[in-house]
Image (spheres, grey):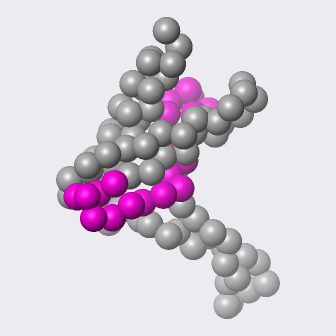
């Protein structure tokens, strides 16, 4: 999978929350994956969360998460995470100087 472009949409303001920005990926100039979230974990590391929606669970009264996009293995997740985090870091560096 060739990631052609990463688009970073930082949140405005400094709320101090975990969510830092949203990202979109353009894959092989054919597909767009929108709604990735860039978050800071409790340990301070950056991570990427995938787009999800709440969906009813047929087996209980609770709702659960239904992910719109999920990498199929750790290598695919690492490939996406590295591209998004690298683009976020470059964006932050360009906008803080």
Q: Position of residue 67 (x, y in %)?
A: 52, 69
Is 64 located above or below residue 52 in the figure? below
In the rendered image, the quadrant that contains the N terminus is bottom left
- Residue 39 visible in the picture: no
Please tell me which residue is depicted at 45% across the width and 17% down the height of the picture: 93
Question: Does the magenta stretch mainly form a helix, a strand or a loop?
Answer: strand
Is 54 located above or below residue 10 in the figure? below
Magenta span has 55? no
Picture mark count: 0
Residue 10 lies left or right of residue 93; in this view the side is right
Q: Where, by quadrant of the figure, is residue 18 drawn?
A: top right
Is 60 located above or below residue 11 in the figure? below
Q: Where, by quadrant of the figure, is residue 31 drawn?
A: bottom left
Q: Position of residue 27 (x, y in %)?
A: 29, 57
Extreme front residue here?
29
Q: Position of residue 16 (x, y in %)?
A: 72, 27
Extreme bottom residue here?
58
Is 39 located above or below residue 43 in the figure? below
Magenta span has 36? yes
Q: Position of residue 5 (x, y in %)?
A: 32, 46
Please tell me which residue is depicted at 53% across the width and 13% down the height of the picture: 96
Residue 44 lies left or right of residue 56; in this view the side is left
Please tell me which residue is depicted at 37% across the width and 44% down the height of the picture: 6
Q: Where, by quadrant of the figure, is residue 19 drawn?
A: top right
Q: Nearer the viewer, residue 19 or 22?
A: 22
- Residue 57 visible in the picture: yes
Q: Nearer the viewer, residue 21 or 74?
A: 21
Extreme top residue here?
97
Magenta-highlighted residues: 26-48
Please tell me which residue is depicted at 39% across the width and 61% down the height of the picture: 32
């Amino acid at each position: 999978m060739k990631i052609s472009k990463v688009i970073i949409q930082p949140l405005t303001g400094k709320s101090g929350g975990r969510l830092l920005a949203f990202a979109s990926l353009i894959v092989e100039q054919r597909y767009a994956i929108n709604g990735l979230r860039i978050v800071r974990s409790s340990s301070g590391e950056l991570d990427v969360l995938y787009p999800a929606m709440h969906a009813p669970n047929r087996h209980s009264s609770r709702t659960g998460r239904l992910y719109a996009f999920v990498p199929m293995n750790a290598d695919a997740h690492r490939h996406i995470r590295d591209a998004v985090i690298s683009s976020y870091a470059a964006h932050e560096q360009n906008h803080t100087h």
